[in-house]
Image (cartoon, rainbow, N blue to C red):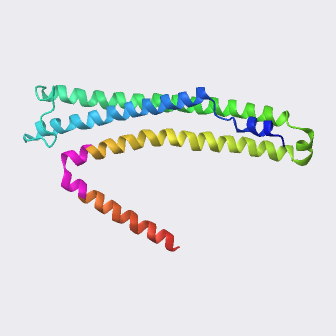
Amino acid sequence: MSASYLSEARRVVDKRLTLQFAGISVASIVAAGLDVAGIILLVPLIESLSNTSGSPLGDLPLISDLSVNWLLVLVVAFFTTKSVAMALIRWWSVGVVLDASAVAATRLFAVYLHAPMDFHDEHNTSASMRTLASSIQVFFQQGVLSVANGIAEGTTLLVLALVVAVSSPIPAMIGVIYLGLASLIYVKVLQAR
């Protein structure tokens, strides 16, 4: 195999695809911010409904003067907007993944067709096509799409953990210790097998 054949075969992801996935990641982080904003607004809403005072988050600017009805409208609006945004982002990301899969398959197949005759004599064409199709599907649909979804979910969890840590530090610390010990025990049990 020549060096040019290997360099062509390595070019699977181009700059346009990288920019699209970066856009999906940024949009997912913004949608996670909508989720966090809705959760932060839940604190004064629950306090207003339960007639308690002294928010663990302190007085939030622009919110302390709002009525319960407006807080409820804002909470519903943030969660609804976040849900619609996440549905659109998932739709966009699936389209980008399918488009990228088609482009990658076309490029790899073109490289395969332009390979030297010795390569074709040594390799089974049907096995190569099966491997190509399944590898592209696994890489893009299970790998790249999972990373994009993981960024969105991880951002949401991180910000929610920060909100919980600020609003209730002692229960948050207990939760971290419990989950840390449970994870450690789980890993030790799995390593023993």
Most foreground residue, 43 or 176: 176
The answer to whether residue 110 is left or right of residue 25 is right
The answer to whether residue 4 is left or right of residue 47 is right
Indicate whether residue 192 is drawn in magenta: no
The part of the chain drawn in magenta is: 163-173
Q: Residue at x 64, y 44 (%)?
A: 138
Asked where in the image residue 56 lies, by quadrant, the reply is top left
Residue 43 in picture, x, y percent from top left = 18, 39
Residue 63 in picture, x, y percent from top left = 15, 28
User: Is 176 rendered above or below residue 184?
Assistant: above
Q: Residue at x 27, y 34 (%)?
A: 38
Asked where in the image residue 33 lies, by quadrant, the reply is top left
What count of labels does the image hold? 0
Q: Quadrant of the N terminus?
A: top right
User: Is 86 rendered above or below residue 187?
Assistant: above
* Magenta segment, prevailing SS (helix, strand or loop): helix
Most foreground residue, 116 or 188: 116
The residue most toward the front is 3
Indicate whether residue 167 is drawn in magenta: yes
The residue most toward the bottom is 192
Residue 167 in picture, x, y percent from top left = 19, 45
Residue 130 in picture, x, y percent from top left = 77, 44
Most foreground residue, 148 or 78: 148
Q: Residue at x 88, y 43 (%)?
A: 119
Q: Residue at x 31, y 41 (%)?
A: 159
The answer to whether residue 166 is left or right of residue 12 is left
